[in-house]
Amino acid sequence: MQDLIEFDEQRKVFHLHNTKISYLFSVEDGNVLSHLYFGKAITKYHGQLRYPRIDRGFSGNLPGSTDRGFSRDTLPQEYSSNGTGDYRIPAVIIQHNNGSYADAFCFKNYKIENGKPQLEGLPQAYVKNPNEAQTLTVTLEDQINQIEVDLLYTIYRNRAVITRAACVKNNSKDSVTLEKVASMQLDFVAKKFDSICLPGAHANERHFDRAKIDYGVKSFESRRGTSSHHMNPFVALVDEKTDEFSGEAYGFNFVYSGNHAFQIEKDQIGQTRIVVGINDYDFSWKLDAGKTFQTPEVLLVYSANGLNEMSQEYHHIIRERVVRSKFKYQERPILVNNWEATYFDFDEEKLKPIVDEAKSLGIEMFVLDDGWFGKRDDDTSSLGDWKVYHKKFPQGLKHFSDYVHEQKLKFGIWFEPEMISIDSDLYRAHLDYLMQVPKRDPSPSRSQFVLDMSRAEVRDNIYTQMVEILDEGIDYVKWDMNRHLSDVYSLGLPPKQQGEVYHRYILGVYELLEKLTQRYPNILFEGCSGGGGRFDAGWAYYMPQSWTSDNTDAIARLTIQYGTSLAYPISTITAHVSAIPNHQTGRKTPLKTRSDVAMSGVFGYELDLTQMTLQEKNDVKEQVAFYKSIRKLVQFGDFYRLKNPTNGNQAAWMFVSSNRDEVMVFVFQILAFAQPEFTKTILVGLDEDRTYQDVVTKEEFTGLELMNLGIYDPVAQEDYTSKIYHFKALK
Ligand code: DGJ
């Protein structure tokens, strides 16, 4: 088995490599760890590249050295120290016992091992056997402060992916305060970048946003206690010319669901630094003597061939080595969810006809959304009381779930475990479970408050309540979170340690998720946070799919799903057909378009099936049967973005099976025009010489034709139309 990591003792160069990528760094003067290269695989590196020496004014030199050509301030580094001459963004800031914030971390030693060590209590990419990856741990040390930092690098054998994380160890006799601990840093020389990030808002998540990186510091971050709708924990740095199919792209996907920051700095001489990790906003961590602090990890991806290749690397690693559930390769059930059908206004008798209708249409699961518990008739009460609402289910929940099961449908249920209403038995019994700063009234959001999930007794209470429900034959859980953290304070920690609460909150949530997902391996968990407010790789470790957005409008979903696909696999992206006029935008789109958009993800319905006309029901029946026939290809095939709807009138994407036998192409036309320009869709990813047959028209094309001549898009006669092509390769 060929080694993936080498250390050239003589030149002091580390080389992580596989058939796709190389990652190189060296131990430089003063034992400073210096970045050399991350990019296309270099089969043999001779170690010639040295960072040029030049005396730069106001960039100081190493203590005790007379060499004015070498400065920490300009050197590309692997993990920069604070307060000792590098004026760029530091990776780590520690306040020491004497009040100082200064460190100078230097190379101490290293270790190479097969496989990938487990990061305790955190989500992460994993290995199935130790031969598929190797891990390098480089230990840096500040000898004066007696602090060590382990930098962890894992390289997989056949992926353009490197995972990075850091672990701080306090070897001194005093406790210190961590003010910032990034998971990774990467410095680039001689590159001009654009950033691509995924900003948004509730019901408007993950828009593809591209901008030039210029001088100064740019930060993409969340301070909301969760990964958020507002800025997804994914950023790419790409060459100015990079497009979907050509050019360099570096992806940074943070496997974490709390506050994050991606800080990018273009320095005084045009070099670019990116630092990724837990946001240092309101963060501090008391690290006692002898203790360690482990950061979450980042999935780094390199693509020499544009954004699609970068995305496919993410799709594969998240699907294959982040998602753990037994459902990871299982075709996901087509569901109907009652939220937009009924909101809070339902009871068992009202839901049964929807279940019956679902059964007759071939739908496979019924999901009971918000409002089944406590005394919940609207969103002002009962969060925290996970007991069935007898007014709505007089004979208990089991009676209703049995009914659903008798119709041969699976039964799913909604929870919002991290929340508490003032009007709840939980609050009346445990006022202190609600997170708030002493003496200060906490701020409501959607009339609800956050539970202090950093405290074990709070988690245990919720766990015990949930288990009672989950033991009653539940097949699926939708885990929601409908507000962000504010008034962050924990009674479980002393005043000086309140800077730990944000991180301890999410560690607590992860611990609860671990317990529940281990106890219920047969339950399919779906993430949700007011739609796609916690759509991140950390969450995917526990939940193989997530509700992408509360916006179910087909046209709005084009940009949302397009942006989401940049960093996350289609098998994680859930999408439902809803009623018109759409409840979020008021738009009226054809049923076919709504269904084609939803079929581009993990498919379902979110409307009152009983209110549809006979014609619509027949259409839905066909859609359901059709999706079942293409579901494997959509959920687990290779996905390619073809046309970006962000600033255009069209969206297009396609799915190709791994052996390139089967192909689905989706083309969406947003507005119609009287004098339309003709447009084409050019396919990609096919075998050039094979013949592909259109399953409907029986027309035949070679792969070369489809990938060069392409196909003319139909001329739209009305707004919001779509077209699907289904090709199969002839034997
Ligand atoms: C927000 C979710 O995204 C919706 O689908 C629905 O579950 C509501 N919460 C219920 O309160």
Image (cartoon, rainbow, N blue to C red):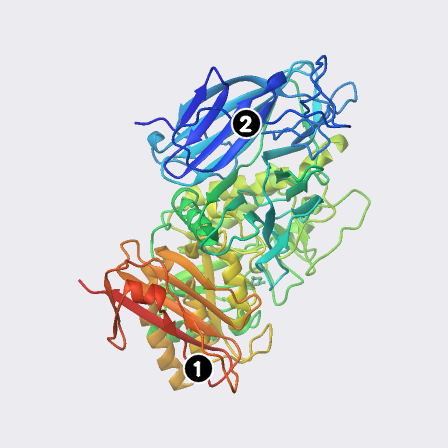
Residue 104 point in image, percent of width and height: 67, 21
Q: Quadrant of the C terminus?
A: bottom left
Q: Is residue 424 above or below residue 669?
A: above
Q: Secondary structure at mark 1?
A: loop
Q: Quadrant of ligand 1?
A: bottom right
Q: Is residue 149 above or below residue 485?
A: above
Drawn side of residue 459 relative to residue 356, left or right:
right
In the image, the residue with mark 2 has its CB under 8 Å from the nearest atom of ligand 1? no
The 10 Å Cα crowd at callout 1, few under 14, some 14 to 19, many 20 or more, is some
Q: Which residue is mark 1?
A: 715
The residue lying toward the viewer, choosing from 486 and 234, is: 234
> Viewer-nearest of labels 1 and 2?
1
Under mark 2, the amino acid is: Leu
Q: How many marks?
A: 2
Q: Which residue is mark 2?
A: 151
Instruction: Decide which of tag 1 and tag 2 comes sooner along the chain.
Output: 2
The residue lying toward the viewer, choosing from 219 and 221, is: 219
Do residues under tags 1 and 2 come within 8 Å of each other at their CB atoms? no
Residue 13 point in image, percent of width and height: 49, 22
User: Residue at 61% across / 67% down in the picture?
Assistant: 377
Under mark 1, the amino acid is: Val
User: Residue at 36% across / 39% down in the picture?
Assistant: 158
Q: Quadrant of the N terminus?
A: top left
Query: Residue reaching furthest right?
Result: 439
Q: Is residue 686 above or below residue 498?
A: below
